[in-house]
Image (cartoon, rainbow, N blue to C red):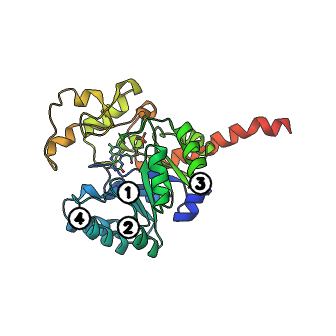
Amino acid sequence: MAKIETEFTRMIDIDYPIIGAPMFLLSYEELVIAVARAGGLGAIPLPNFRTTEDLKKTLKHIRDATDRPIGVNIHLSGRFEWKAQLSLCLDAGVKFFITSLGDPRLILDDVHASGGKVFPDVISLEQGLKSRDRGADGLIAVASGAGGHCGTIPTHIFVPYLKSKTGLPIIAAGGISTGAQMAAAMAVGACAVVVGTRLVATIESRAQAAYKEAVVKAGPEDIVCTARITDNPASWLAESIKDFDEQPEVGSRRWRDFWSAGQSVAQVEEIKSATEVVREMVEDYIRVCKTLGEPFLEIR
Ligand SMILES: Cc1cc2nc3c(=O)[nH]c(=O)nc-3n(C[C@H](O)[C@H](O)[C@H](O)COP(=O)(O)O)c2cc1C
């Protein structure tokens, strides 16, 4: 299949502007490898790893399987051994760093020296401008309805808003499970998309079987956005948090029982491989772009 070239695919050297979301406790080597092999950018969240030794093993596993670019979500907070994690990632050739907690300036020089890029997650213009002024290479516009920690502004408004006010490359995150939704995000100015919820229900995600099935069965009405679980607004399958009383300890297995997913469960119809998800998104994207172009071709 032909490549889809954007500012982001050229920056990172991937075939398609599709990022497999780094999902806490779900995205590990299997998912990263599947997305990378399909031509997208697979990513892992570093808080998945209790020790740097565990992270090292996973990075080696990925590198034994593919030499394609990969990404990580790094938490730049004292609670994490981020310096040791950063150095392992740079040694493994990680090219893309999504920062959520902390100041991106802490890693910019090292990442740039190895040819990588840093894109913070943002949910407001204020956060976007702050990240730009600190030297970020681009921004991830986390929109309303996204799985995991979500924003409050819809993708089709937030992406062009951030783009025009910051002048940075913008990646859309939230509500993108199909190629048509990807085309919509690109139409409003995104240079790539982050896909989370759709990839929960894949063979390669480490979600429990019942969680994957719940994502397939759910509609957008079954998702609630609340700060009750992690102290920050996040999207959850309402049913999975109905008995939540208090936060389990960090690292407790009980966290696995609270199931995060975004409103784009609406477009998740079956469990399949992540490679197939990426391939179908690309095919759908191309079909939609051609269909949208047809009326203009007829006028000419
Ligand atoms: C179950 C789940 C866990 C997530 N965990 C993380 C995480 O650990 N780090 C992170 O940067 N983003 C995390 N996200 C958010 C995604 O990176 C991304 O912003 C979001 O999934 C995009 O919206 P979508 O779910 O509508 O595709 C998570 C998303 C989901 C669904």
- Of labels 3 and 1, the one closer to you: 3
- Looking at the rendered structure, the secondary structure element under dot 2 is helix
Of the numbered discs 1 and 2, the one sitting upstream in the chain is 1
- Tell me where residue 283 appears, x and y as whole percent: 58, 45
Image point (21%, 42%), residue name: 256
Inter-mark Cα distance, 4 to 2: 13 Å
Queried on whether the Cβ of the residue with tag 3 lies below 8 angstroms from ligand 1, the answer reads no
Quadrant for the N terminus in the image: bottom right
Inter-mark Cα distance, 4 to 3: 32 Å
Q: Residue 94's quadrant in the figure?
A: bottom left
Inter-mark Cα distance, 3 to 1: 19 Å
Image point (57%, 43%), residue name: 161
- Looking at the rendered structure, the secondary structure element under dot 1 is strand
Which residue is tagged 2?
A: 107
Of the numbered discs 4 and 2, the one sitting upstream in the chain is 4
Asked whether, in this view, residue 5 is left or right of residue 125, the answer is right
Which residue is tagged 1?
A: 99
176 shown above or below 132: above
- Tell me where residue 81 appears, x and y as whole percent: 23, 64
Badge 1 vs badge 2, beta-carbon distance below 8 Å: yes
Image point (26%, 70%), residue name: 84
Instruction: Tell me which image quadrant ligand 1 sits in.
Output: top left
In the foreground, 123 or 276: 123
150 shown above or below 96: above
- Amino acid under disc 1: Thr
Inter-mark Cα distance, 2 to 3: 22 Å
- Tell me where residue 15 appears, x and y as whole percent: 55, 59
Which residue is tagged 4?
A: 81
